[in-house]
Image (tube, rainbow, N blue to C red):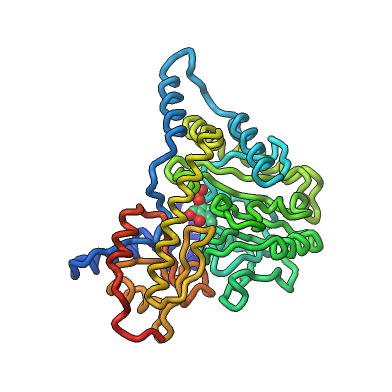
Amino acid sequence: MANKNPLLSQMSSDNSSFVDFIENKLMKIIKAYQEKHSRPVYTMSFGYTSHPLPATAVKAMSDYSLGLGEAETYTSYEPVTGNNELKQALTNRYQQKFTVALDVDEIFITDGAQLICSAIQELFSQDSVIALQDPGYPAFIEGIKLTGRRYLSLPCYEENGFIPKPPKEKVDILCLCFPNNPTGQSATFEQLQAFVDYALENQAVIIFDATYQSFISTENIPRSIYEIEGAKKCAIEISSFSKEASFTGLRVGWCIIPKTLMIKDSKENELHKMWSMQHQIKYWGPSNIAQRGALALLSEEGQQESQAIVDYYLQNAKLLRQGLKSLGLRCFGAVDNPYLWVKVIAEMDEWEFFEYLMHHTGLVGTPGSMFGLAGTGYLRLSAFGSREEIVRAMNNLPASFPDEIG
Ligand code: PLP
């Protein structure tokens, strides 16, 4: 019998998830527009990556796949929390890049970050109150709504530089994502320290989504929550190879649960053990082929190739930002981040602006309210498309908008 979960009706006003909205509603609008107009349309609403995979990962995966067809080199299940070499290579990356010391066991290899954004909430009791950024990555809020937990929003406006302060109220879980999708902002050491201090004082836990950590090149911006003092006692980190190495289709990410992490009534190591149990019962991680590809990414050559991919997307982001700024639009993000957060022209609502931009420039973004109420009045553009398309779109921009921008 179908699970008629009444909470599903809270997902959005028209009962759809974010992915549903993008794949169906938004695509229908674009299609309808294209049927009426012959102008080119550049769809930049999605996080779909376009740059081909790093060659080292491709080779590692093809060699490994061929080996699976031979008796001598065939392998069966990977360890349930992930390939040990991959976990070791990740601890090396944390040590070398962020000066963060992790135990290999503290890392769990996952099939990307998406599932974990909501599944990690299962570690905590049903009456836990959650605070989360608004606007924010939809999987967090959708995960909360599916379970019916109470939550409060931490609004991210231009006035607070899109970085909220810790809540005044007491909450049990804080969901944070930096560099942020969709606003494109990164938090400073001080800003994150305030959240860690809050969590320690209130025996709360931080769920930190660091999916875009490799996009940060500005000095003195933390890339992992564990760069913040005290975070290993109160934070879980989620991250992924999806965007930094175009691994979206391969599905490899990771989740870090320090053994020292404790919340009010838990004992040391308890949350870590509970998450190991979840892996044993439900997940078992990505395919052994994809894990070999991820391992290759962490070789010296793989890291250089991944960096080239990150630079490619960042250059796309820069071109987008320059192009839209030249039209007089107020733009945020797209530095240390592949997303441009564009303020809607004053006298329009965001759907009017969405259509106006599509009509005058061919650019299709995602209206900001799809990421939360406080995102209303903005539009997100993704820089994950191909350079050719971005350049074509920017070359096709008009010199100015026909109407005056308010
Ligand atoms: N978290 C954030 C902030 C994201 O932007 C995304 C994907 O766009 C994800 C998680 C999910 O990523 P993955 O492909 O690793 O599941």
Q: Which is more toward the observer, 138 or 359?
A: 359
Q: Quadrant of the C terminus?
A: bottom left
Q: Which is more toward the observer, 393 or 8?
A: 393
Residue 173 in the image, given as x and y percentages of width and height: 69, 60
Up the image or down, 207 lies above or below 304; here it is: below
Residue 345 seen in render: yes
Residue 317 in the image, given as x and y percentages of width and height: 44, 60
Residue 6 seen in render: no
Residue at horizontal 50 percent and vertical 72 percent from the top = 375
Residue 28 in the image, given as x and y percentages of width and height: 29, 64
Residue at horizontal 47 percent and vertical 61 percent from the top = 339
Residue 330 in the image, given as x and y percentages of width and height: 46, 76
Question: In the picture provided, is 297 more to the left or to the right than 189?
Answer: left
Up the image or down, 77 lies above or below 33; here it is: above
Residue 380 image-quadrant placement:
bottom left
Question: In the picture provided, is 161 more to the left or to the right than 323?
Answer: right
Q: Which is more toward the observer, 314 or 237?
A: 314
Residue 198 image-quadrant placement:
bottom right
Question: In the picture provided, is 380 more to the left or to the right than 236?
Answer: left
Residue 97 image-quadrant placement:
top right
Total numbered badges shown on the rendered structure = 0
Residue at horizontal 48 percent and vertical 40 percent from the top = 305
Up the image or down, 4 lies above or below 65; here it is: below
Question: In the picture provided, is 406 more to the left or to the right than 166?
Answer: left
